[in-house]
Image: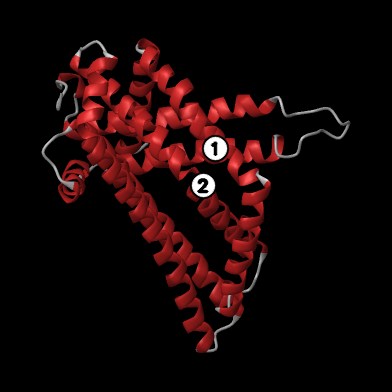
């Protein structure tokens, strides 16, 4: 096993240790803050209104794919539907994320810092930190969302441009399909790198003072130097966990009955809790990763930025 993988597994074990020994504030974030966001993320794509918008946007993407020369294979249709669903659900859940999820991520990062500093977690101190930095945290969160949306727009434009150019040169639909898959693969790698950097920047904006938005990203680039593979492994674990829970919700709850008519809607709260737990672990791993980037021994750090 590679060194990067070992480091990532050690971060996961460290996260489990912190959660086991200091569960109070993290479970508070889970039940009071993260769970409502998870409900919004899981239920909004399945509502009647958003479902109609998702279908309409998915058809628009398929039309763009067809006009650019891409063959409408099952994979292309599924990709268009997935992107449309993510865009609609992210748009409608943005107010929840801004009001609750940002607060939860701040609480998680602050709590992890308190654990490493050997300090007891006082919510009055945390609220003071939030009050003093909330404007910067909101600006950073909006900036990160804008950056990720810009990446998605660039991906769609690049995919359409490449396929349209190849179609104009007379290449076969198979060549267009493989070229499109290559663009999707390249985008996925770039998106993963940017997401890891953004997650680290979010932690930096909570735990370090004296940085503007640009300097926060620069600070994150400096910290993550030589550690990107570890961050990508953490991102992969998180995205696989979230995708699995979302797939279970889609196939176990969206269809409300078994073949014999018995209800399976009772599984919904359990899957929401699972989704919330994966999100909590992801936030904790990002905070632990921040301290790992600063030092191989994060327990030597004192809480900064009080």
Q: Position of residue 256 (x, y in %)?
A: 77, 35
Q: Position of residue 114 (x, y in %)?
A: 23, 18
Q: Position of residue 165 (x, y in %)?
A: 47, 83
Mark 1 Cα shell of 10 Å, populated few (<14), some (14-19), many (≥20):
some
| Residue visible at 51% across and 36% down in the picture | 241
Which circle's residue, 1 or 2, is located before the other in the chain? 1
User: Is 89 on the left or on the right of 149, as rendered?
Assistant: right
Quadrant where the C terminus sits is top left
| Residue visible at 82% across and 33% down in the picture | 258
Quadrant for residue 284, please give it.
top left
| Residue visible at 21% across and 48% down in the picture | 217
Q: CA distance from mark 1 to mark 2?
A: 8 Å
Element carrying mark 1:
helix
Name the residue tied to disc 2.
92
User: Is 172 on the left or on the right of 11, as rendered?
Assistant: right
Q: Nearer the viewer, residue 166 or 95?
A: 95
Outermost residue toward the left in this view: 210
Quadrant for residue 205, please give it.
top left
Disc number placed over residue 291 in the picture, else none = none
Disc number placed over residue 40 in the picture, else none = 1
Are discs 1 and 2 less than 8 Å apart at CB? yes
Question: In the rendered view, would you say 123 is above or below 68?
Answer: above
Q: Nearer the viewer, residue 234 or 116?
A: 116
């Amino acid at each position: 096993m590679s060194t990067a993988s070992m480091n990532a597994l050690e971060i996961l074990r460290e996260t489990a240790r912190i959660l086991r020994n200091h569960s109070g504030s993290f479970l508070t974030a889970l039940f009071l803050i993260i769970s409502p966001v998870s409900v919004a993320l899981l239920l909004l794509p399945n509502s009647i209104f958003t479902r109609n918008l998702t279908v309409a946007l998915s058809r628009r993407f398929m039309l763009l794919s067809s006009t650019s020369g891409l063959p409408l294979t099952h994979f292309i249709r599924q990709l268009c539907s997935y992107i449309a669903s993510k865009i609609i659900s992210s748009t409608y859940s943005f107010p929840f994320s801004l009001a609750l999820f940002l607060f939860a991520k701040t609480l998680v990062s602050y709590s992890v810092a308190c654990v490493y500093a050997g300090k007891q977690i006082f919510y009055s101190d945390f609220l003071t930190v939030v009050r003093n930095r909330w404007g910067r945290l909101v600006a950073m969160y909006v900036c990160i969302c804008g950056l990720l949306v810009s990446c998605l727009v660039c991906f769609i434009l690049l995919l359409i441009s490449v396929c349209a150019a190849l179609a104009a040169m007379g290449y076969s639909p198979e060549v267009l399909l493989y070229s499109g898959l290559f663009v999707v693969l390249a985008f996925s790698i770039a998106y993963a790198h940017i997401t890891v950097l953004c997650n680290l920047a979010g932690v930096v904006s909570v735990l370090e003072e004296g940085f503007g938005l640009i300097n926060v990203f620069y600070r994150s680039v400096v910290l993550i130097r030589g550690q990107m593979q570890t961050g990508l492994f953490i991102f992969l674990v998180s995205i696989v966990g979230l995708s699995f829970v979302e797939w279970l919700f889609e196939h176990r709850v969206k269809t409300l009955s078994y073949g014999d008519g018995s209800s399976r809607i009772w599984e919904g709260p359990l899957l929401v809790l699972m989704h919330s737990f994966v999100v909590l672990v992801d936030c904790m791993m990002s905070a632990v990763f921040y301290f790992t980037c600063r030092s191989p021994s994060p327990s030597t750090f004192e809480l900064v930025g009080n």
